Image (tube, rainbow, N blue to C red):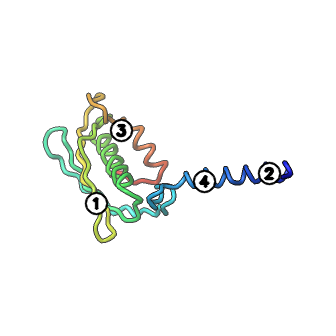
């Protein structure tokens, strides 16, 4: 066979094979392929005890749990700043999806200094990121 024809055919076959690997084999789509049209429906904030704060958020149009988590994180960061604190530490977030509405129930501690733990946030940095990404805060 002519090498001028064979080389493009090999490249085409290789490219087709690689593109098949790009999508999950179980039929799911990646987060980036889902249309993201969020409608943020509000935050309910409750001081539980001392520096422990509970945030209930709700939204529609989320792609997955991560969008709900980010919304709660934005609320926690702004709340920390409002209270005169610069940091927060994520304790837990649970997410529920029913009737097209995503609900998050998140708990954070707020503190003036960087708290111990792995899931800490710098409130100013997070609030700035939320503003850049169009995610409302408290």
| Left or right position of 112 against 131 | left
Q: Of label 2 and label 4, which has the lower sequence position?
A: 2
Q: Of label 4 and label 1, which has the lower sequence position?
A: 4
Helix, strand or loop for disc 1: strand
Q: Label 2, label 4: how many angstroms apart (C-alpha)? A: 20 Å
Reply above or below: 102 against 73: below
| Left or right position of 138 against 50 | right
Q: Label 3, label 1: how many angstroms apart (C-alpha)? A: 22 Å
Going by the picture, which residue comes out furthest to the left? 49
* Closer to us: 90 or 138: 90
Task: Please tell me the numbered disc located at residue 19.
Answer: 4
Q: Label 1, label 2: how many angstroms apart (C-alpha)? A: 56 Å
Q: Of label 3 and label 1, which has the lower sequence position?
A: 1
Q: Of label 2 and label 3, which has the lower sequence position?
A: 2
Judging by the rendered image, the residue that carries numbered circle 3 is 123
Reply above or below: 98 against 44: below
Residue pictured at 47% horizontal, 56% vertical: 25
Judging by the rendered image, the residue that carries numbered circle 1 is 103
């Amino acid at each position: 066979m002519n090498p001028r024809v064979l080389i493009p055919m090999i490249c085409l076959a290789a490219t087709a094979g690689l593109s098949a690997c790009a999508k999950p084999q179980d039929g799911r789509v990646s987060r980036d392929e889902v249309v993201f049209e969020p409608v943020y429906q509000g935050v309910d904030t409750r001081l539980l005890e001392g520096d422990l704060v509970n945030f209930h958020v709700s939204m529609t149009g989320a792609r997955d749990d991560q969008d709900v988590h980010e919304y709660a994180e934005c609320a926690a960061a702004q709340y920390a700043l409002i209270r005169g604190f610069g940091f927060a530490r994520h304790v837990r977030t649970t997410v529920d999806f029913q009737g097209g509405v995503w609900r998050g129930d998140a708990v954070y501690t707020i503190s003036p200094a960087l708290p111990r733990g792995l899931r800490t946030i710098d409130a100013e940095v997070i609030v700035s990121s939320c503003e850049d990404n169009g995610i409302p805060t408290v």
